[in-house]
Amino acid sequence: MKTFAEFDLEPKVLQAITELGFEEATPIQSQSIPIALTGSDLIGQAQTGTGKTAAFGIPLISKIAREEEKIVALIMTPTRELAIQVAEEIGKLSRFKGIRSLPIYGGQDIGRQIRGLKKKPQIIIGTPGRLLDHINRKTIRLDDVKTVVLDEADEMLDMGFMEDIQSILKLVPEERQTMLFSATMPPNIQRLAQQFLKNPEHVSVIPKQVSAPLIDQAYVEVPERQKFEALSRLIDMESPELAIVFGRTKRRVDELSEALQKRGYSADGLHGDLSQNQRDAVMRKFRDGSIDVLVATDVAARGLDVSGVTHVINFDLPQDPESYVHRIGRTGRAGKEGTAWSFVTPREIDHLRLIERVTRHRITRKPLPTMAEAIEGKQRVTAERLMDTLENAELNEYKGIAIQLLEQYDSVQLLSAAMKLLTGEKKDSEIQLTPEEPIRVKRRGGKHDLRSGRKPNGGYSGRGGYGSGSGGYRGGNREGGNRDSGSRDGGNRGGYSSGGYKGNREGGSREGSSYRGSGDRNKFQRPEGGERRAPKREDSYDI
Ligand SMILES: Nc1ncnc2c1ncn2[C@@H]1O[C@H](COP(=O)(O)OP(=O)(O)OP(=O)(O)O)[C@@H](O)[C@H]1O
Ligand SMILES: [Mg+2]
């Protein structure tokens, strides 16, 4: 492990890193920072929660001069929440250097953004749709941009942002550095890389399994109509500090968060149909702990970094393995442990097996939590609260009544009554959720490997993320890599018969590995005022 002092960074950047509490660089940071500082293009892949933001943020900030009054760096993210979060981290990293950065995303008052732009930020962090709006209004000019980062590039493609990204990048000078980061690199990413990156260096920090190593992964087989009961019991049994529950559709998320509230849980929902103010409020409440269950669509699957998320629960299985990896990666971050549970209906077992195969990780089957376990879990929490109060609170005012009660009643009886009261038994209100169709396994042509998208012989062979002891990836064997001709983008994704950057992947050279798909998936109308999505995704993958 390297310390940050080993990189050639200016004191003000180092100071900011120290202030953030980072002591050692994570593997992706150790490898990416020196390369990024040279200015070469870069594709960075590393497990969720291992510090990819700082891996591009630190070099990016290092290269900007404080006096600059133009936009010199552009970071694109697929979701608004991620734009806000990345902007925050960039803000913290550039604090002492005095670099200005600004998030630009849909749903926020454009006037406010224009006022922000007048302060001449050097770094813009934005979602593609709103960025284009500003470009069209001429409130953002990209003529001086020297560095572009595509965070979660594969997701941006899946959301149908390809054309927007193309239009944006056409306006950025050719002489620039382009970096692309994600935990997963499905083959379609190569199309983007070939178009927009020049001889990129690949940095992959991926051990055998793609998902982060500190996540305990389990599933329970549960019929659709029993899922809600299973969820309540699971939450009671595990008593998460903070949990994210993923539902498949916006309707599901609405129904689920309402149902959880009805049962007395402190939960709220997040999805793309809420107003930006509502989305921001929910995220704020979750970050500050005033709600402890966030129910969300895949809008929260990528990149979000909320410390204290101990549990991720897939109430519905995600459509594909990439999404699984990103969803569960909301826990087990920055060296902490986490737990991921997935609910699988009997007809979805095959889909779970596919996820296991692609992520190369066995997911442990566990029985449905029993009522007794749920009650025991709740009682444990009550007992912990009680002991905490015992140790930390001022109790003198209560002692008189306590002595009186103890004279009258048996102490065990008395404490049991107090615990019952504190546990706050939940109302067993009847909950009816609209059933979701089971996810079907879709044929995935060729061998799918989430670890693709790197050069065959240059893999990293050290530890994967912090805290993991597993060995690194050595060599590549992506065979053909046809992702899937019938997947969620309507079957027009088209595969690569052979991939390969720098012409050295088995069976293909860079020039020879042409993209064979038709571009139809991007030919659709952009919804009014909204951000663009692929049509297939809209109905089957509605976030
Ligand atoms: N060197 C470091 N030491 C300690 N903590 C770090 C270090 N670098 C980053 N972190 C912290 O780790 C957390 C995860 O970082 P980040 O969000 O960049 O992960 P990521 O790799 O982008 O994950 P994802 O794939 O989910 O987007 C953040 O809270 C960040 O502040
Ligand atoms: Mg990230």
Image (spheres, rainbow, N blue to C red):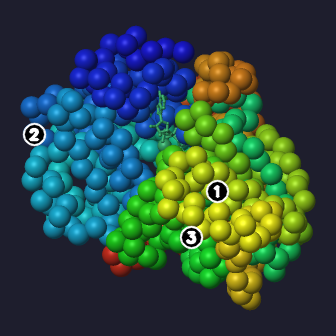
Q: Residue at x 68, y 60 (%)?
A: 382
Query: Would you call the spot at circle 3 few (<14 residues within 10 Å), some (14-19), or many (20 or more)?
Result: many
- Picture coordinates of residue 479, whole percent (x, y): 75, 36
Query: Would you call the spot at circle 2 few (<14 residues within 10 Å), some (14-19), or many (20 or more)?
Result: some
Q: Residue at x 17, y 45 (%)?
A: 121
Disc 3 designates what residue?
267
- Picture coordinates of residue 376, whole percent (x, y): 81, 61
Disc 2 designates what residue?
69
Secondary structure under tag 2 reads loop
Instruction: Give the mark nearer the N terminus: 1 vs 3.
Output: 3
Against 365, residue 225 (above or below) is below
The image quadrant of residue 336 is top right
How far apart in space, not on screen, are marks 3 and 2 (Cα)?
A: 43 Å
Q: Residue at x 74, y 31 (%)?
A: 208
Instruction: Give the mark nearer the N terminus: 2 vs 1.
Output: 2
Q: Does mark 2 have its CB less than 8 Å from ligand 1?
A: no
- Picture coordinates of residue 156, whole percent (x, y): 48, 54
Q: Does the CB distance between marks 3 and 2 fall below 8 Å? A: no
Residue 534 vs residue 435, the one in the foreground: 435
Q: Amino acid at mark 1?
A: Leu
Secondary structure under tag 3 reads strand
Residue 183 vs residue 246, the one in the foreground: 246
Q: Amino acid at mark 3?
A: Ala
Q: Amino acid at mark 2?
A: Glu
Residue 418 vs residue 91, the one in the foreground: 418
Query: Would you call the spot at circle 1 few (<14 residues within 10 Å), some (14-19), or many (20 or more)?
Result: some
- Picture coordinates of residue 338, whole percent (x, y): 67, 45
Mark in front: 3 vs 2 = 3
Q: Residue furthest top?
A: 6
Against 168, residue 539 (above or below) is below
Secondary structure under tag 1 reads helix
Query: Which label belongs to residue 386?
Result: 1
